[in-house]
Amino acid sequence: VQLQASGGGLVQAGGSLRLSCTASRSSVSTYTMNWYRQAPGNQREFVATITRGEITNYADSVRGRFTISRDNAKNTVYLQMNSLKPEDTAVYYCNAAVLSRVYWGTGTQVTVSS
């Protein structure tokens, strides 16, 4: 599977963005799909996940503000980000996981200004 993330940009604190992760060569429905982020000088950290059975989970720092969803017809996973904070600034990456295999996509920059 190949993954392409998009939708990042510059937004003011309190604003919203929707990230997309579009897959090719394979269907997103066959994977657990995840979003991670990495801020400068920090390790990559988990943000959100959606399983094949549509079970979702979130990092405590984004729970209640971010929503992960999947559109199998468009072969795309989304991350709706609301009430953005400056500390959400990072490069956001999606990955697809099945058994012991993890496939990473490209990143998209999100910058939240105060």
Image (spheres, rainbow, N blue to C red):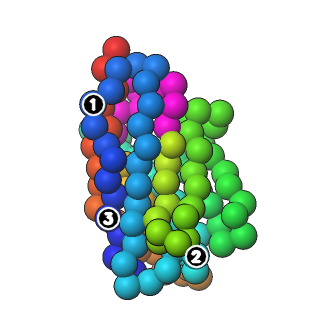
Question: Gap between marks 3 and 2, in whole Å?
Answer: 16 Å
Question: Gap between marks 3 and 1, in whole Å?
Answer: 19 Å
Q: Secondary structure at mark 1?
A: strand
Q: Reading the chain from its start, which is encountered first: label 3 or label 2?
A: 3
Q: Which mark is residue 22?
A: none
Q: Is residue 41 visible?
A: no
Q: Reading the chain from its start, which is encountered first: label 1 or label 2?
A: 1
Which residue is label 3 attached to? 4
Indicate whether residue 87 is drawn in magenta: yes
- State whether residue 98 is above or below residue 88: below
User: What is the magenta range?
Assistant: 81-91
| Mark 1: amino acid | Leu
Q: Which mark is residue 29?
A: 2
- State whether residue 45 is above or below residue 16: below
| Residue neighbourhood size for the residue with mark 1, other residues' Cα within 10 Å, grouped as few (<14), some (14–19), many (≥20) | some
Residue ID at (41%, 55%): 20
Residue ID at (52%, 72%): 73
Residue ID at (66%, 72%): 52
Spot occupied by residue 30 in the image (x, y as percentages of width and height): 58, 80
Spot occupied by residue 59 in the image (x, y as percentages of width and height): 60, 43
Q: Name the residue at the top extreme.
A: 114
Q: Secondary structure at mark 2?
A: helix
Q: Reading the chain from its start, which is encountered first: label 3 or label 1?
A: 3
Question: Gap between marks 1 and 2, in whole Å?
Answer: 30 Å
Which residue is label 1 attached to? 10
